[in-house]
Amino acid sequence: MIYVSRLREIIKAEKQIIVAEQHAIPEDPYEQLRVAIAAVFNSWMGRRAVDYRRVNRIPDSLGTAVNVQAMVFGNMGTGSGTGVAFTRNPSTGEKKLYGEYLLNAQGEDVVAGTRTPNPITQLKKELPEVYKEFASIAQLLEQHYKDMQDVEFTIERGKLWMLQTRTGKRTGAAAVRIAVDMASEKLIDRATAVRRVTPEQLDQLLHPTVDPKTDATVLATGLPASPGAAQGQVVFSPDEAEELAREGAKVVLVRQETSPDDFHGMVAAEAIVTARGGMTSHAAVVARGMGKTCVSGANALNIDYSQQQFSVDGNVVTKGEWITVDGSTGRVFLGQVPTVRPNLGPDFYELMNWADKFRRLRVRANADTPRDAKVARGFGAEGIGLCRTEHMFFGEKRLAAMREMILAEGVGAREKALEKLLPLQRADFVGIFREMAGLPVTIRLLDPPLHEFLPSVDDLLSELAELKMAVRGAATLANMDKLLDEIDEKRTLLKHLIRMREANPMLGFRGCRLGLLFPEVTRMQCRAIFEAACETQGEKKKVALEIMVPLVSLSEELRQQAELIHEVARQVMGEHGMTIEYHVGTMIELPRAALMADHIAAHADFFSFGTNDLTQTTFGLSRDDSSRFLPSYIQNKIVSDDPFQVLDRDGVGQLVRLGTERGRSVKADLKVGICGEHGGDPRSIAFCNEIGLDYVSCSPYRVPVARLAAAQAALEVAAAQAALDAATEAAKAESTPEPALSVASD
Amino acid sequence: MIYVSRLREIIKAEKQIIVAEQHAIPEDPYEQLRVAIAAVFNSWMGRRAVDYRRVNRIPDSLGTAVNVQAMVFGNMGTGSGTGVAFTRNPSTGEKKLYGEYLLNAQGEDVVAGTRTPNPITQLKKELPEVYKEFASIAQLLEQHYKDMQDVEFTIERGKLWMLQTRTGKRTGAAAVRIAVDMASEKLIDRATAVRRVTPEQLDQLLHPTVDPKTDATVLATGLPASPGAAQGQVVFSPDEAEELAREGAKVVLVRQETSPDDFHGMVAAEAIVTARGGMTSHAAVVARGMGKTCVSGANALNIDYSQQQFSVDGNVVTKGEWITVDGSTGRVFLGQVPTVRPNLGPDFYELMNWADKFRRLRVRANADTPRDAKVARGFGAEGIGLCRTEHMFFGEKRLAAMREMILAEGVGAREKALEKLLPLQRADFVGIFREMAGLPVTIRLLDPPLHEFLPSVDDLLSELAELKMAVRGAATLANMDKLLDEIDEKRTLLKHLIRMREANPMLGFRGCRLGLLFPEVTRMQCRAIFEAACETQGEKKKVALEIMVPLVSLSEELRQQAELIHEVARQVMGEHGMTIEYHVGTMIELPRAALMADHIAAHADFFSFGTNDLTQTTFGLSRDDSSRFLPSYIQNKIVSDDPFQVLDRDGVGQLVRLGTERGRSVKADLKVGICGEHGGDPRSIAFCNEIGLDYVSCSPYRVPVARLAAAQAALEVAAAQAALDAATEAAKAESTPEPALSVASD
């Protein structure tokens, strides 16, 4: 009776709230049902639903359905209960029932995390008959749907009711293991296994974890809700998380517990920490689905939203402070803790092997150092698609020589400075050639504007201002003399800097323009490359060399640079009495290059689309400056994706397609690849596959993702073709075929 | 005998020079002839020949011929002589024999300017029979060639020999007058008259002259060898002229006399001054051909090459000092003297009228102020193709309001600042609408990056450094307080500046990106435009308004901005109870816009190709930064012309053509124009004519040139068509035509 009276009180209170918001409450139960159904339909346009669809790329036009069914109750005493479970472990993929339940509770109690539930294995002891039935149904469902299931159930006075089954969300590790296991169990075939792991899930596997050797302060330990390691500044509201992330900050969202209203903040955060809730709480499920690090149920956290801080055992952490979250172990650290790359298990390599069997596109890596090259090869890169030589100049000693070269007056002085750089570059190339023995290495000649290697004008102006003040306060005349000398020196440098400063360096004196005005730079680089190739080949390691000329817009630029490359090649090979197999090609990274690809191809053995710069110039959009308005463009649906992340098929893609076609129209065997950031993006890779590129090149850690995406793109095409063939076959079977007529012709 | 012995001495001396350079001297006259012929052929690749061809766009592959003929001598006493003459005055076009001669002299003596020759009219007195014969031959030659002739003659012991006749070089004024006169004389038809004046010659007519009211110091007076007024820093060597001009300096080349070896320096100079030589000296003829201001034979100049200075009556002018050259009167002024625009005679207007009859392309002007609009209309502009609203913000009061708007925090503060700008913009628009009543006016919404309106970071840093030093030296505490306040203020501004600074402003937060992020800016501009239109229309002056959205790359950008424009239009028209006819269109100035023109056209009434920015993005080439390498590109034939001067047909032109075709594929009546610098370049205009654009828009002073170039382009097409028709006709006459078969069909 107490129970009923409490219910009545609650109903009364709720009614008052509804009436206060000026809604009439219908007394007719059918009318109530109608209103409830309408509420579900209306939820389709609610903020959290819209946000969710945006992140998961679900079209707004899809709509939703409403099921009306009788209610069962899990809160009818200790013989009743409710729970959720996965047919396999959604964190590790282990083939073992995994879930939680609460007796005398309703579904919301488990999911919302307001009570901490029991592991499903405990049900075996509490209600063995029910458990047995449940386990058998779960297995049946998995067999039927041929995928890991996420099921919800309620026990009403000892009777098991299945409420729902759906394909379970899982971590990357679980996705790989489940796919490989199910293929081994013959539940699915290998193509299906390869298609079932999303590139995002695979990417998760490659995410860092907290360095096991760390001795950083553990603030709190919760549940390892979604693996990976991430760092960010603490924020407490989802709106703030979104806002700060838009400004480029890395944030960790800390909440008592999350609800679907927090979704946009979870998207924006690097990681999520909750004080309450279990492994299947909202925070945990959503974070796993997004591959986002999450620790849930860190009970020790004492969160104070009003003060924008939380405390643990007397330690107070305020908004803006850095924390590190380890979703694999459930630990939360104070500050920025070092992270390490993960160890990959045999399932991963197995799946990658299967993927390689299906793909047509080759996958290379962008690598500038022997170390990067080694990592890339370890991840299965089939060559280096982009080796940026400028990154080699950034060591302290090298930078000094580079600056000397840049500030040199006249060819003679420049050549002298270049002589110092030659052995350094050569040694780098030898290291890379050794690591990549037998695989192609594409080396790009010097590309960025020279002033990138010099100090900034602002810095120098500040230094000068300080020196001038120091002169005023100088204690001795000798001291003053020294300071004045220093001022003179810095003034000379400043003059140089100002002379070299460019209004739009991205569109300035860079790329092959450098090599054409200062051929001695190209000559030094080529000498370093060919000497390194000879040295490596002398060690019986095969070098497959490709030299790439950057920022070509006029075919004559490439012709003249290629001529110079061949000249140095002949020289060095003559000196070493060796033959190096090499190719000369160009980046296609300016709209004019794509438009004139047929002329440019006459001087090129290969093309590599530099889609970063091609996107910048095609859109007239500087990547460095776009953050001011691009997020609002995406928000306001002016553009569907950041074109620097996902290749813009309509515009930039048109140029890539056209450049490829025109290039091959004059040189059928022209090798064509892509080496922008897009080379590691699955949707962009699908496009590259579609238009017949030969390879994609991406950062070393993206290589496995690219291999998988390339396989999936090929399988997609094959599936579409099979569907088409089947339809054609069916149409053929339906119509009465005409007998074929053979007509003689001479 | 003295004469012969001097000749022998000269021969001996010359032989020694030749032998010293290790050439054997053949004694066989036929061998001598062969070597002489070879020398002529070899001269084709000499520096001055190569330079000349480059400037005059003569292909290197053309080659040269050698004529061998008997020599006649003008230096056989006073009954002999030599001279050059034009059948009409090459400076003014007056129909009157014009030239110079020297008795007892050879041709080189006249041309090189080493002796000052006599006017041709004097020959009438000295050798009347010869003069009569010469005058009659000159007229015959002009009638035959139907153009003004430049003839050379020698009189050998009383007998007249014609050495050469060719079409005479002339000034712009002469070209116009001769063309119009010859058409009036029925020597040529009007189409020929229009085709005969080059755009460069017409442009000369529009060049400035020295302000007649000036009281500046006249340094010297020479011959008015080539009209116009120009200013520059004095240089004495052609190499130096070329070098300084490449760095952006304006120079005047001052020489004793010029020779073909000086050609490259003359090309680089703003004007040429020589101390010796007549109206047909090398300097005079070459300068007139290039439309370059020249004063020749300024005998008072005492040039000292070694000291890099010249003196006139004790005034010493050193290298680097500014002088002003008036080629129309022959005066040389010290310093930079104000210049004024020329008065155009009836011949000019007559020729322009004829040109207008032949052209298909409309010609508009780029004009930002009522004054510019008035000038443009005076020159025959048929509308404004580009009115840049940002130029209106550069007055002192306006700039302050603009800065307030830019630095405003939040929409409210920004709108308050915009309210101050509204009446200023409106007044500008009213002025422009009044001037252009009845003609279309295309107004472009705010385009440049906002930091263009703010002081530079460097300046502010310097100011801050100075303020800091001032604090140290402050006499009173109150003074110091004031200075510290100022420092605080400047620091706040600096923070803003640094936050707004962009890596590549050309590709940054500008164009419609501003209007989309700050719709209140677009709203203010549109309100100013529509209020001005209502006001002007209230005065019974017709407004033909076109609003142009800049820097569109995504069709959605245009759709959203157009929506906003329509909204404000409806509002303002409602408030005024008036209807304004207006169109909304967009600049096509990014490669993506051209590629996606079919999508963009759905929201546009017109396109205007902004070929400046389109060239920058298609080439990946910043106009501001290209001067470092573009001249060397042209020198080394990597590119044939500066793509910012002459539209790059192959690359950028491909996008213009494709954008036009795609735009019209969805909207057949789409109005398409061009408003980059190329709109005033004759070769680019020919291209615009060829691909079917509706109009070109150029700077007001280029409008006549564009009208002429558009007519010539149309005549060129007509001539080619006529030639094709004739060939077809001829082919038809030759073949036996089949009788036409009429086949019935339903």
Image: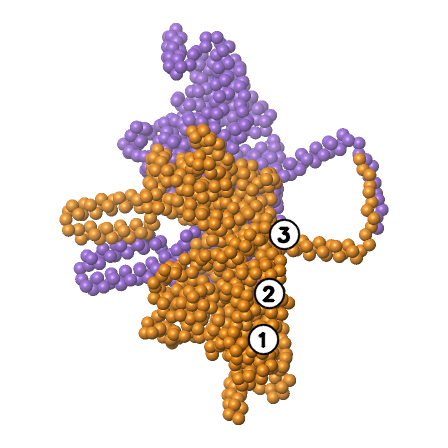
Chain colours: A orange, B purple
Residue at 45% x, 62% y: name it: A228
Q: In the rendered image, which quarter contains the N terminus of chain B?
A: top left
Tell which of A99 and B169 is nearer to you: A99
Three-letter amino acid code of the residue under disc 1: Lys
Which mark, residue A147? 2
- The foreground one among B532 and B743 is B743
Q: Are marks 3 and 1 on the same chain?
A: no
Question: Residue drawn at (42%, 29%), measured in percent from left and top?
Answer: A575
Q: Is residue A100 above or below residue A502?
A: below
- Tell me if residue A407 comes above or below residue A721 in the rendering: above
The amino acid type found where label 3 is placed reads: Arg
Residue beneath the point at 62% across and 70% down: A140
Q: Please name which of the two marks, 3 or 1, marks the residue nearer to the observer.
A: 1
- Distance in Å between CA atoms under marks 3 and 1: 71 Å
Under tag 3, what secondary structure? helix
Position of residue B489 in the picture relative to residue B52 (left or right): left
Which of label 2 and label 3 is nearer to you? 2
Q: Quadrant of residue A326?
A: bottom left
Tag 1 secondary structure:
helix
Residue B576, percent from left and from top: 54, 68
- Label 1 chain ID: A
- As helix, strand or loop, the secondary structure at mark 2 comes to loop
Quadrant of the rendered structure where residue B109 is?
top left
Residue B283 visible to an observer of this rendering: no
Task: Give the image location of residue B70, x and y in percent.
Answer: 52, 13
Residue beneath disc 3: B664
**Mark 3, chain letter?**
B
Residue at numbered disc 1: A132
Which residue sits furthest left?
A476
Q: Earlier in the sequence, mark 1 or mark 2?
A: 1
Q: Residue B363: image x %, image y %? A: 56, 47
